[in-house]
Image (cartoon, rainbow, N blue to C red):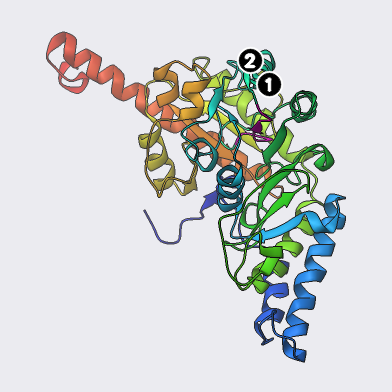
Amino acid sequence: MQDNIKRLYCDFNATHPLREKVKEAMWAVFETVGNPSAVHTHGRKMRDLIERARRDMADMLKIDIDRLVFCSGATEANNLVLLSFDGPVIVSAIEHPSVLQVRGDAQICPVTTNGTVCLDELERLLKSCSQKALVCIMAANNETGVIQPIDDIAALVHLYGGFFHCDTVQAVGRMPVCWRAIDSFAISAHKLGGPFGIGILGLNASIPLHFPFKGGGQERSFRPGTENVWGIVGMAKAMELALQENWNTTATQIYWLEHYITTVCPEAIVIGKNAQRIPNTSMISMPNLDNTQQMIQFDLKGISVSNGSACSSGKVRKSAVLQAMNIDPDVARGCIRISLGALTQDQDMQQLANTWYKIHTRNNEQKQQENAKDLFGLSVDNAL
């Protein structure tokens, strides 16, 4: 691969590139010194930066300011809620590993083949709980983009006196969220175009949690430790910009891409096609070629795509999401995720579509040659 190749980034669900205005906002903090817990002028200036960012983000989300607790990101936020709740826990089968792998005693709520939670089964699980339960269901799936019926879930959980925690990492700025209906939620800055290592745990005072961390007293002792001031300031700016974005063009691009691919290759399958999805995400299965080989070939052509969650330390493994949706294993092996930014250009989509077609065509030709060799003991070239 040539070093000067124009690279195309189509993995925004893994992380959004750091925005220029976020860099500028953070740089101003780099020039400031002081511990935000100190009472002198330098410390108070840093504290003011934190509280101003907290107030701005609370206003953006239209929630009370005291609900926002800063932490290292959504993985920590999810873990804190799950590990701090003493009662029964219910999680959906398609959750991020930071939810699905935390509580060994969690009851698993299944999903439909379209990837939405089975509400009847959720109600059955809630009825079976002898105590108030914590229900953890994400707003939008990071692999398929499928949106969950959050309002219906919240109403059902509260009907049975439970508490609703929602991983909203892929939702912020891409879909409407009724934040007041959720008892706790998780947000990561780097999904919005902010820095790594900073996020929000949103809390309602009513949810009974016993946090494990001790020392310092920062963040009302929910998450003690000296705050990541530049990260917090960067997150506030990233959220502001993310909530201003218009996704209409992106939704059209995804529709065009799926239509093109399924037209040139009718055997291709769009996962969650009939479900409501966030506008930037498409998971498509290419027949007869596993997703690892696809990602390598796309990467050699200068395009970054994914095979699903990016939170397994670079490991390639089977998708628990697709297994939960009862997707045929052969189809699942051929799935790649394409996730776009609000400023992705039409010509970028043309490049992506052309590359997908070339990879598919080349793979088909190789399969035909292999089949001919199997039948006659000769390669196609030698036979001719």
Which structural element holds mark 2? helix
Whether residue 44 appears in magenta in the rendering, the answer is no
As displayed, is residue 334 above or below residue 310? above
- In the rendered image, which residue does mark 2 sit on? 121
Specify start and end residues of the magenta stretch as a single range: 131-141
**Mark 2 crowdedness (10 Å alpha carbons): few <14, some 14-19, many ≥20:** some
Between marks 2 and 1 in the image, the one whose residue lies nearer the viewer = 2
2 or 1: tag closer to the N-terminus: 2
- In the rendered image, which residue does mark 1 sit on? 275
Q: Which residue is drawn at 83% across and 50% down?
A: 61
Viewer-closest of 25 and 108: 108
Give the percent coordinates (x, y) of residue 284.
53, 27
Q: Residue at x 59, y 47 (%)?
A: 84
Report, in whole angstroms, how far the alpha carbon at label 2 lies from the one at label 1: 19 Å
Q: Quadrant of the C terminus?
A: top left
Give the percent coordinates (x, y) of residue 1.
36, 53
Which structural element holds mark 1? loop
Q: What residue type is labelled 1?
A: Ala
Mark seen at residue 108: none
Relative side of 294 to 58, left or right: left
Give the percent coordinates (x, y) of residue 323.
46, 22
Viewer-closest of 313 and 83: 83
Q: Is residue 93 at least partly visible in the picture?
A: no
Q: Which amino acid does label 2 sit on?
A: Glu
Whether residue 137 appears in magenta in the rendering, the answer is yes
Viewer-closest of 381 and 183: 183
Looking at the magenta stretch, what is its main secondary structure?
Answer: loop
**Mark 1 crowdedness (10 Å alpha carbons): few <14, some 14-19, many ≥20:** some
